[in-house]
Amino acid sequence: MSYYFISIGGSGAKTLEALTHLCAAGAMPSRGDLNILAVDPDSGNGNLERSSTTLNNFAPVQNLGVGNDTPLFKTKISIIEPFPWKPVEVDMTLDDLMGYHLQGNNPLGSLYEVLYTQKERGTRLNEGFRGHPSIGAAVLAKKSIPREFLDKILGDANSGNEVKIFLAGSVFGGTGAAGIPTISRLLRNELIEKSDKVSIGGVLILPYFSFVASQDNRDLFARSENFHTNTKAALKYYAQKDNVFNAMYFVGDSQRANVKNFSVGASSQRNDAHIVEFYSALAALDFFAQPVTQTHEFKCISRSDSDNFSWMDFPTLTESVNEQKSEFELQKRFVQFARFIFAYIRFVKPVLKDLLDGKRSEYQYPWFVDYFSGAGIKNTDIKNFEDYAEAFVLWLKQLETLERREVSLIKSSMFAANPAQILHPDEFKSCDGSKTDLTLHEVWYRLSENVSFDSSVSGFGRFLRRLYDACKV
Amino acid sequence: MNRNVRTIVKIAIIIAGTIICGALAYFISSAAFGHSLATASNNMAYTNWQEKFSTLVIFTGAVTGICSLAWFILSRWVFEITSSTGGGRRIIWAILAVISLAGSIAVPQIYSASAGIKVNVLVMAVFVIFFTGIGYWLLSIITTPAAFKYTPVGARLIRARK
């Protein structure tokens, strides 16, 4: 099975961030590669920048030798270039793209003038489609999907693999709302001959945040008061038109989170992580786990408490191990991964540099003697992993401290982010609300015990694998 | 072997090791120096000297056995590591080593004076080798729980895996 994920716009990028963490935790349905394409005309978008930083931190980490018999880092993520794919060149306006100067005086030009306001036509699109899907739809319809991406999909389909493509984006903004129907249609047209091998799914992210724009801003930008109208129009489109999706997921939140710092776009558009993006990433996992020839099903996910998100609300996931399908609990896998990250931050990060520099006595750290001493571990591997761990904790902290909602996945009182640290070590054993005997001391103890691994486990990966295993309840 | 079984085995090794060390110290000292020390102890009968010497061995062995067991209990159940600076505890191990060493030297001095038998420096050397050297140091290297396995001096040479 080959997996493809296309993030479109800011909400898509944030879903990509959540999906990256879920992949790292081993929540993907099989060991196949996950190929990522990001679509955003605003390449400096803070949300995309954050996702791509997470991806870039994770990319080298996933190649560490943790072994082939563990969920840890089991999915290899490949980034498709150009990343992101920008459908608009720098400083271009809609007028430039549509060739308005060539057809200004003919009937087509007149129609164009009716459909788009002067502001929509004349605004430079460096910061995206500014909440106006009508601009995005026109731009994207004139573009074609990057050839490298299509060739990769066709290559997989031609070699007999089943291909699953998943798109994520909002329906209430600009880029996502324009991109999801347009790109999915372009893909379907290009892959029409392979429709028995290729299935396309998508998550349509409904409104889940709002913001107050500055009054003096005269630029064209997204307005949260338009989100409902945009959503209604988009849903009507999907209900009435014959859409190309094999599976669609709808995720949103009636309680809108307030975006603290409004931004038209670029690097200042950097919003906190949200549970809706976590759900959207889970939608991708659900889609990837289904067979290509899936019959039509209508599923609805519910919550046990309307104001509280807890592990009880998430379904079990499916994975293939040695071509055998089995179910696993997301909670167990995710919490083991979170504990693994926290244990590293607590025990290893504060002292590792000193130990490697010979500034600390090694005897105090049996794990250092067993896994690091003389193992030739590269500092870059350590740094990449630590950067990734910081990004994970920051994302998790934001998820846990959601405004107006209580999220009870990992106790937020236990840890702090930026820099990542454990504030209450005694909460480690019950960090997900369940009672366990897995204290930090127990993790240290297990980490120090002698364990053998096969030859696929090596270097820094060998240590990470042992630490991960030590965090299993 | 799970951790509980390993714990029981290690406690048994400490107890058995201490008894074996005591027996070796007793037989080696008796065989090598017993007759001359019995003569030096106001011509005491050898069997009488042996009887008093065996009590001395038991006392000295008990001191080092307690030290070994105390280190095991502390490192297995008492010391808790919840931060990156919580490991090691070599100072505690060293204090117990000093107590064991002091026991190997002082107990013979004090006991021999009160029991009216003579011991010489070679007997004390045997005690140091068997009780502090093997009974405490070597046994602590072998039996220290994983979380502190390299704390005993020299443990890394024996226990580190490559």
Image (cartoon, coloured by chain):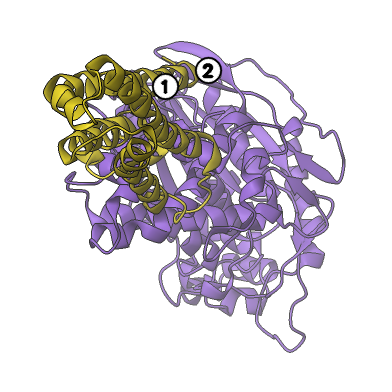
Chain colours: A purple, B yellow
Read off the residue under disc 1: A162
Q: Are marks 2 and 1 in contact (CB under 8 Å)?
A: yes
Residues B115 and A127: in front is B115
A150 left or right, relative to A5: left
Residues A400 and B73: in front is B73
Pointer 1 local density, CA inside 10 Å: few below 14, some 14–19, many at least 20: many
Q: Is residue A5 above or below residue A350?
A: above
* Outermost residue toward the right in this view: A306
Residue A338 visible from this viewpoint: yes
Pointer 2 local density, CA inside 10 Å: few below 14, some 14–19, many at least 20: few
Label 1: chain letter: A
A248 left or right, relative to B148: right
Identify which amino acid the numbered label 2 is placed on.
Pro
What residue do we see at 42% from left, 37% from top? B67
Q: Picture coordinates of residue A341 (x, y %)?
A: 49, 47
Count of number-bearing discs: 2
**Quadrant hosting residue A460:** top left
In primary-sequence order, the first of circles 2 and 1 is 1
What residue do we see at 52% from left, 65% from top? A419
**Quadrant hosting residue A120:** bottom right
Residue A190 visible from this viewpoint: no
Identify which amino acid the numbered label 1 is placed on.
Glu
**Which quadrant holds the C terminus of chain A?**
top right
Label 2: chain letter: A
Residues A441 and B6: in front is B6
What residue do we see at 27% from left, 14% from top? B47
Residues A324 and A195: in front is A324
Q: Which mark is residue A291?
A: 2
Q: Secondary structure at mark 2?
A: loop
Q: Is residue A448 above or below residue A413?
A: above
Q: Picture coordinates of residue A298 (x, y %)?
A: 74, 23
